[in-house]
Amino acid sequence: MRRPIAAVAGVASGVLALVAAGCGGGGTTSGVQGASHTLAGGKKGGTITILSNGDVDHLDPGAAYYQFTYAITYVTQRPLLAYKPNSIQPTPDLAASMPTVSNGGRTVTVHIRHGVKFSPPVNREVTSADVKYAIERGFDAAVGNGYAGAYFGVIKGAPTKIVNKVPSISGIQTPDKYTIVFQLTKPSGIFVGALQEPLTAPVPAEYARKYDKGTASSYGDHQVATGPYMVQNNAAGKITGYTPGRQIVLVRNPNWNPKTSWRPAYADKIVFKEGFDPTVGTKQILSGQADANGDFPPPAANLKQILSNPSQKSELEFTPTAGARFVALNTQKAPFTNKYVRMAVAYVLDRNAMRLTRGGAIDGKIATHFIDPSFGNSGFNQAGGYGFNPFPSANNSGDVAKAEAMLKKAGFKSGKYSGPQITQVADNTPPGSNTAAVVANSLQKIGFNVKTISVQHAAMYTRFCGVPKNAPNICPNVGWIADFHEPQADLDANFDGTNILSANNVNWSQLNDPAINKLMAKAKGELNAEKRWAEWGQIDKMITSSAAAIPWLWEASPTLYSTRVTHATELWNGGEPDVSFMSVK
Amino acid sequence: MGAYIVRRTLWAILLLLVVSFLTFVIFNVFPSADPAALRAGRNATPALVHQIRINLGLNKPFYTQFWIYLKGLVEHFNLGYSYYNSESVKSEIFSRMPATISVTVGGFIVWMLIGLPVGIVSAIRPRSILDRVMMGTSLVAISAPVYFLGLVSLFLFAKGTGQLQWFGAAGSYVPITQNVGVWFNSLILPWFTLAAAFAAFYARMTRGNLIETMHEDYIRTARAKGLRESVVITKHGLRAALTPIVTMAGMDIGLLLGGAILTEIVFNIPGIGRYAYDAIVNSDLPAIQGTVLFGAFFIVFANLVVDILYAFLDPRVTYG
Amino acid sequence: MSTIRDEEQLHREGAADFVQVEIVGRTPWELFWARFKRDKVAIAALVFIVLLVLVAILAGPITAAVAHSPDAQFPQYLDSFGLPSGPSSRFLFGLDQVGRDVFSRVLYGAQASLEVALIATAISVSIGVVLGMTAGYFRGWVDTLISRLIDITLAFPILLLALGIASACSLGNGCVAGLVHPGLGTVIVAIVVINWTYIGRIIRGQVLSLREKEFIEAARASGARSSTIIFRELLPNLVAPIVVYSTLIIPQNILLEAALSFLGVGIQPPRASWGQMLADASPIYSTAWWYFAFPGGALLLTVLAFNLLGDGVRDALDPRTTT
């Protein structure tokens, strides 16, 4: 599972710029692009510039949990596994080979490569103890990792809640310098997939411990790298290349050994320039002053222009994002405790108009359930594919008549809702604010009186939608991106009843359906991939039919490149350009 | 004179104290939510909120909190810390000062260069066609909001997006140290947009003041003495008419240096005003609070300077 | 504060000329009206304003008759990229970014702007007049207190203060135990807090000179109470500056409300407001010119009309002004 889709605090923000599909990979809406973009044979040298509107969340690999940050994290740090551009299967990165699973799924063994070194000032070779420390520190409140419990809580000895120091986890064993053995409390179908999370990137304990002390770790400000690039620092290890909100400078890691890595790392230097208005940034990329967009999609008006210009069109890549955007209905608060009222909403929402607020058909396909098309036969087809649409309407514009029929079933004889006002908490900037306006408008057609509270994007999560006590009836601007290529990552966090927290809750619908919970528990421990995918497909159908949340978009994220660079994209990490594969032409 | 200056300075200091107190009340006391949680930014972990609570002294009584706040202000000019950006508000504001100064000072020069001559010419020939046209245009300029004028000028003249691509577009600002040409080009539209309303206002004021002054007895005397009209106007009329204008300009600059918000937003100039606006969009309370305080300081300071200048310029001033 | 500075403050508000007028008994309205009638431009402005008020009041019936509801969305008329279309026979002023009729929203926006400006002006003028009269008549510590209060208020950067208040009150449950939320209330509060000071100063100045006149002395000698003197004797003589000042401050308040809405802390969507529409237009101005042109033009014309009206009223009340 991946953290929620966060919009950029800017004018025409978009999702964490999800990736652009690729040349030859992923399932784009328009199929495979031309073979003119290759990932091999680039020229060494030069500087690449990436533009963004907002900032990264945390440079510390143990805390980073944001699409845009991953563009930096994955090229400066080496987790055990990683995704090559345009692929949906992880490849060993720090690991020497794919992990082996034994003991009925309760033991996972990983061998790491020899000769991988930390960047200055640590300089020594990476050992298994460094991976152990990296994962352990994720459970420390001072680091504040957002997924440690979800994916790594299944390790024996892992804390069951966040603690105030770096714990020692007995279930992570390091029999020798290059071997890690994970002992799990129960079999987990997705533990291997989770090993591509940045939390598994090694952190040198003797160097980092002093920074991890206290209430907030400052390791991020002194971090060392294992990837081909590093954030520029001084001799003492203090990061000098990061000016918050302005820019991040990556330089080559002198201790990186290309023989141990499949990353070509063509460019000598990569500069991330922040604070750009999407329209201005797009123009700069088109004119060659910058090379790609980092966290904003080109605004719809620019996309229209680019698509009508053949030479510009070839610089645009679309990538389907894994996951969906949806509207969450609070199932614990009237009137959405009643499933027929929820179904009425599912019927009446004008998904087509909602998609228009994000740029229309080029933005992706209308979602009819939650597991998205990029999963193909590993969940999407099992969930019914494109054909499963329990709440159809002509042109996906909403069906008022069917919605009214549902309301009648719920007890509203006239077919129109006649209860008290309902509230939705929405983004205060476009396009989220526009999408919320469309949602309110659709609901008004069947008699709802909707009050919209507009707040800043992060506050929407941290103060309202993510806090059950304060949650409104509707959270229209939410969505989810899977952390890795497993349908569990698409559904577990948002719809498992056991995942409801009192703060930072991501089960925004507060769905707690015993039948669904039971099936999820079974699927989570299913080691056979085919069976697992079939089970999650079934779960998707159940969730969609309950209308606890209404999916409306399987987004295809546009990445625009300048003509001076070759293209490369990452898939799961939000369509960010993988700068270790980009080169100046 | 000395006593006057001392009294005005003491009053300014008292004013600053009261302003600090009111800002503290508005941003710490008024909001119904937990002040620490409001400040904790994007990643409000319980540990962080707890830390903020200690820093602000929220478990202590009200006056202790204010004392902590005041001490930080006076000793380090600590305007607060923005957890959203992981930057102190003070350093953010100071790093953005050059941009705001560029906009403000440039705009000031433009509006004075336009407004004063227009006002003088209109005053010399009141109720002529020229006067009517100029005053009419001035009225329109005053009536148009800055952001509307900004959008219109961008629509017409901005490179890349405008109809006639003459001047720098929104967001093309670079610091003067980086590239003087681009810096200048990016500021032309903002300068004229900002200057429009002010130029109009000053034109009207200059005209009104000068007309009145020209009715004074000593002007009649000067004329009776046989002095040329131009000498009468420049040596006698203007001096009295311009004094209040110069002092008002001082106050306007003081106000704008706190951040010409609307202009900076429309033209995407990374100044203090833009910082305040971003802070509001992001609900970054410490940043907003620090900027309001900073702006108020500038106004009080500018007022003090103006009052002291008055003591030198105008012997009629009553010390009280 | 020196009297010279007070005058500069008055110059600032454009009511400077009025200071020179000698107040001799009640102003004959016939005289005023005769002079006003001769000013063609001011009459035109008055007519425009009357029409605007009518349109604002009748926004509902008008839009129902010739246009569409301001909240109705028509995504079918957006192009395939979600970009709005321009003026056409169906949508006189084009569409906005979610497919709403700009013409209707401009009319309803007039409603919002006028409502805020008139209410806020009325309240701030009332407060300013009462406090100004009190300060001017009683002098002493009362005067000092009120004058210092004015100084403190004016020390704050207006827009930033309004923004700060609105922002601090938009998180969680608002401010002052939920009384202040972003929206109409905040805008009015912000405007009132700032505006009362200007008229307070002017009225105070007027009262300071009026109270020395014989008719006030006579009233005092005859044993009238202070409140009677203030409201029966002073107030009628202050009607003229109050009227002039109010007509001058209304356009400023319209602009202030629009600025706050532009910055997102004024009138909240989905209620239409001109400032909000201009903010929405900013990212798409180059392709959707109608979206800033019509609300902006409406704003410009409205403010201009009030400014012209104010000028005309001032000229008619004081024949010595040459405009």
Image: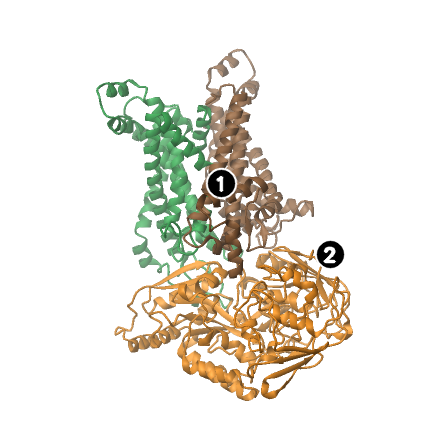
Front residue (pair C136, B189): C136
Q: Position of residue A443 (x, y in %)?
A: 36, 68
Amino acid of disc 1: Ser
Asked if A480 appears above or below C297 in the picture, the reply is: below
Amino acid of disc 2: Asn
Per the image, label 1 sits on a secondary structure element best described as helix
In the rendering, what colour is chain C? green
* Disc 2 from disc 1: Cα separation: 39 Å
Query: Does residue B151 appear in this view?
Result: no
Tell me where residue C49 sits by quadrant: top left
- Mark 1 belongs to which subunit? B
Mark 1, residues whose alpha carbon is within 10 Å: few (<14), some, or many (≥20)? many
Q: Position of residue C283 (x, y in %)?
A: 52, 56
In the rendering, what colour is chain A? orange
Front residue (pair A303, B103): B103
Give the residue number, with chain letter if any, for mark 1: B20
Q: Position of residue A183 (x, y in %)?
A: 61, 81
In the rendering, what colour is chain B? brown
Q: Position of residue C75 (x, y in %)?
A: 43, 66
Per the image, label 2 sits on a secondary structure element best described as loop
Give the residue number, with chain letter if any, for mark 2: A234
Q: Are marks 2 and 1 on the same chain?
A: no
Residue at 33% from the left image edge and 49% from the top image edge: C56
- Mark 2 belongs to which subunit? A
Front residue (pair A323, A170): A170
